[in-house]
Image: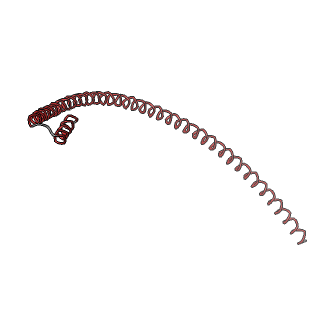
Amino acid sequence: MKKVTAIIAGLLLLVTFGCSREDAKKVTEKAKDAATATKEAAVDTAHKAAEMTKDAATATKEAAVDAADKAADMTKDAATATKEAAVETYDKAAKMTSEAATATKEAAVETYDKAADITKDAATATKEAAVETYDKAAEMTNEAATATEEAAEDAAHKAKEMTK
């Protein structure tokens, strides 16, 4: 770009100050040569830029493939670790469930035994209370019968005295 500007500036100077026809031809020829060289340089630069872009695209593609392969490997590793953790968690949960079931069964048996003992104690206490109540009722019935007999005798004795 600088060459083109220099050539144009040179042409303007020549036109402005005047020069011979032969000088003008030389300048024109040099300008053409410079334009051709500039054009060739631009084409070379474009080719180099295209080649560099192609190389960069290839490198990017290779890096992307490597990254994808690494990601796939990491995903496989993560899946394996997750599966192992899930199996371990399942085993622990199964063990804890079994232990909880055993503890629940033992607690149920213990509760049943305690309930049976309490029921037996209550039955014994109820039987004793019933026997005691029966004995008291019998005693009170006997006392009432005795009192009734005494009252009847007293009433008969008073009735006899009154009739006399």
Give above or below for 84 relative to 138. above
Which corner quadrant holds the N terminus?
Answer: top left
Instruction: Name the residue at 71% across, 50% down.
Output: 133
Q: Is residue 110 left or right of residue 16?
A: right
Find residue 58 and report its horizontal and vertical position in percent: 20, 29
Find residue 49 and report its horizontal and vertical position in percent: 19, 32
Q: Quarter of the image holding residue 47? A: top left
Q: Is residue 151 left or right of residue 80?
A: right
Find residue 40 and report its horizontal and vertical position in percent: 13, 32
Q: In this view, does 57 lie to the left or right of 159?
A: left
Furthest toward the bottom, the residue is 163
Which corner quadrant holds the C terminus?
Answer: bottom right
Q: Quarter of the image holding residue 141? A: bottom right
Nearest the eye: 63 or 34: 34
Nearest the eye: 123 or 64: 64
Find residue 91 and report its horizontal and vertical position in percent: 40, 30
Give above or below for 139 relative to 112. below
